[in-house]
Amino acid sequence: MATSEPIQNEILEEETFEEQNNEAENNDVNEEAYRLAAEFEAEQQQQEEEVATTKPTKTPKKDSGQRKPYRFISQLAPKKGSTTQILKNPEIQDFFKGRENNPNQYFYTPEGNLEIKGVKNIPNKVIQIRHHFEPLTEPQLVELWNAREEALKEKERAFGAAQVNLRIALEQYAEDGSQTAAELVVQANESVRRAEAERTAVAYPERWVDLLQNPVIQDILIMYEPYEKRKMGYDVAMLKHFDLPMNTAWGTYVEGPASGGAVEENNLRIYFITDINDEKTGHFHPYTQRNFKFNETEYCCPYQAFEGERFKQLGKEDLRKQVLGTRSGRTIHSIAVKDKTMINAPQQLWEDILFQFFYQHPDFRKELDATGIDKFHVMDKEVPAEYGSALEKARIRLRELGDKDLDHQEAKEKVITEEEQQKAKVGAIIHNFRKKF
């Protein structure tokens, strides 16, 4: 369809008007650019003159108001330094420095002191932290938990009341919108914040952050990326907590002579499991070497049984064979960290394994039964935290079993023997020697 002449004239006039406006805007932009360039040159010249006559000084950077780029946690984390600067005793400083490199030689005694294993002609040495360590009795521990529950209930009630006051203040402000009502909203909001902080302090008295160095995605995003084995690409901070204050949860140090290790009948001991070489708690360590049968497989230690059964449930037969091909707890751990995918009910698996382990070794079972109702605390960072609780539950099951006998288990699969492992070590040494020449 042809366009009429009046409409064509209007279109031409509009296009001409837009061109004139664009040209004017471009002229304004050019003039502004020229002005900024002239000001910049003048500032540069003035700075050069000042530099020529005076010494250079650092000028504070002005905030541009722009959003700063994201920084990884590794950049935000404080620099690693000595954690023993606050300790004045040089012996204690040397102990913690040595423990960072060799935790098997520097460890804690069940009494809470520091012990250094001797080498060659140097005898063992014990550093007394206090005169005497008094562990908590069971009634004291129950009292601590009851006090925590009561305090938490009180803080919950205070937090709920603060929320009600805030709701009332917001409704009042919505009705009249006065300055007084606004101030009441601010005060009520501050009361809610303060009440929540007090409630959190009671619920989580001990909190700390562990920095995980570039972890695997499936270990962090368990619910969303259960099969993603690539790395996160950056460090991840993990918040942890303990329900009771550490300075009261285990016991207290008191001045006065030690009572020769004797403990009252109702007192609650805490066994600190450090390593397999410890005379008092070594046989409770999951690396303890004693062959036993579990699920038609003969294992050399409880830790090997747990990792072997975990890989069996995950279908990782290659890793399971590697676990069964060694008798070293540290080597098993190095294989286990290749795939950290956790199975369902790991605590139950630990409990079943420990039950069979101590049942099949009556001498260990007798020593476990002699611990009474005492608690177990694992000091080895390679041992999972739930191990101590599983050991206590296995102890209860063994007592309930009494003198009853269980069916004998047949082993269809066995761990490598000590002779086979020794031959494998010799073969590996010869192979590495030949590679060098």
Image (cartoon, grey):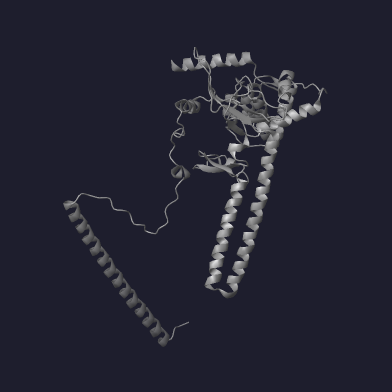
- Where 198 sits versus 364, above or below? below
What is the quadrant of the C terminus in the image?
Answer: top left
Q: Residue furthest front?
A: 256
- Where 377 sits versus 147, above or below? above
Q: Position of residue 362 (x, y in %)?
A: 74, 19
Residue 296 visible, this angle: no
| Along the viewing direction, whichever of 46 and 277 lies nearer the viewer | 277
Q: Residue furthest left?
A: 53
| Along the viewing direction, whichever of 148 and 283 lies nearer the viewer | 148
Q: Residue furthest right?
A: 404
Q: Say left or right for 366 vs 26.
A: right
Q: Position of residue 167 (x, y in %)?
A: 62, 65
Where on the picture, by quarter, is residue 357? top right
The image shows a total of numbered marks equal to: 0
Q: Position of residue 192 (x, y in %)?
A: 59, 58
Where on the picture, by quarter, is residue 390? top right
Residue 186 visible, this angle: yes
Q: Residue furthest top?
A: 121
| Along the viewing direction, whichever of 204 and 256 lies nearer the viewer | 256
Q: Residue at x 54, y 71 (%)?
A: 180
| Along the viewing direction, whichever of 285 and 329 lies nearer the viewer | 285
- Where 307 sits versus 211, above or below? above
Q: Residue at x 65, y 58 (%)?
A: 160
Q: Say left or right for 365 vs 179.
A: right
- Where 7 sits versus 74, above or below? below
Q: Say left or right for 199 vs 294.
A: left
Q: Position of residue 292 (x, y in %)?
A: 71, 21
